[in-house]
Image (spheres, rainbow, N blue to C red):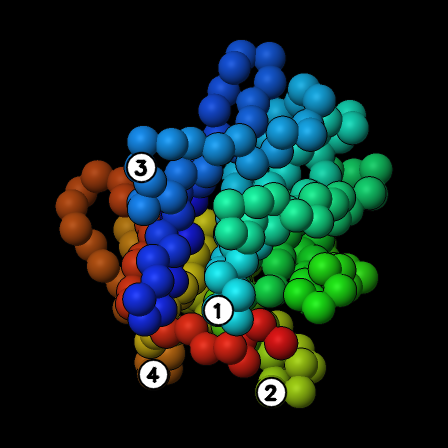
Amino acid sequence: AFARADYPLREYNVLLWERDFGNYSHIFLKTFADPDSEIAVNPLAAGGFSQEPVAAHFPTNGALLIVWQSDQPGNFDLYSILYVNGEFRHYQQITTHPSDDLHPDLVGNSLVWQRDSTILHSHYTLTDSAWSAPEVLDSGSCANPTISRGAVAYQKRVGDDFSIYRRTQTSGGVWNPPQLVSPDGDSRLPSFSKGLPLSLIWQHRDTTDWNIMNLSEAAMQPQLFIFSSADEIRPRAVEPSIISESDFF
């Protein structure tokens, strides 16, 4: 995972990754200001596999909010920690459900993840360092959520294939009904670019190989990209970050 944010006279680019020790794994952090040093993000973890780190910056104080999944209690739950001025604060367990909580994605203070076949959402409040109670965005054969400011997307099984659905959020925080955004065929692994303009991409197959499909903010229909006769899978997009303080409160 790569957390990027640009502010005048301050540099906060951070690299996060999982280190596999065989029978357990930990999350590590490296800042681009000090590339020769690495820091263990979850030093309190007693064994288990800590995986899939995601992060976002708070522009008010430069804090880095980090979330990951870990099976240290026996099943996978989500954990978070704040990294502020070289110190870790407010280490906490976000979920305690007996089912596995997996595949977190984070933008600003908004978090989505998958539990069984359900997509859930929670938001973080910096003033009291607390997560809101999880809310269900969709249930039944759902997987692989992705989030951008004001929108969540995920794949949902329809018959033998998967389709991509998107939910947008009003300025008042109300979620609009799920909207089907992919055409006929098999569509999987959606991913939002984290900058602007808003762009959602995924892998798509109708009859032959996998190709890449993109739905931009201004477009009414997604666009198909065919680069070769081979399978094009697991797409990711990067665009310039435009972050304001209002994204976090």
- Numbered tag placed on residue 35 in the rendering: 3
Q: Residue at x 57, y 45 (%)?
A: 87
Foreground pick, 21 / 171: 21
What's the distance in space between the residues labelled 3 and 1, CA to CA?
22 Å
- What's the distance in space between the residues labelled 4 and 1, CA to CA? 28 Å
**Of residues 218 and 164, which is closer to you in this image?**
218
Residue matched to label 4: 218
Residue lying at the far left of the rendered structure? 228
The quadrant of the picture occupied by the N terminus is top left
User: Sequence order check: which comes first, mark 2 or mark 3?
Assistant: 3
In space, the residues marked 3 and 4 are separated at their CA atoms by 38 Å
Crowd band around label 3 with a 10 angstrom C-alpha radius: few (<14), some (14–19), many (20+): few
Measured in 3D between alpha carbons, the distance from the residue under mark 2 to the one under mark 3, in whole angstroms, is 39 Å
Give the image location of residue 100, x and y in percent. 73, 38
Residue drawn at x 66%, y 33% is: 70
For marks 4 and 1, the one nearer the N-term is 1
Kindly identify which numbered label has been placed on residue 59: 1
Q: Which of marks 3 and 4 is in front?
A: 3
Judged from the image, the secondary structure of the residue bearing numbered disc 3 is: loop
Q: Which of marks 3 and 1 is nearer the N terminus?
A: 3
Q: Give the tally of numbered discs.
A: 4
Q: What amino acid is found at the position of numbered circle 2 in the picture? A: Ser
Q: Which residue is drawn at 49% across and 61% down?
A: 62
- Give me the disc on residue 171: 2
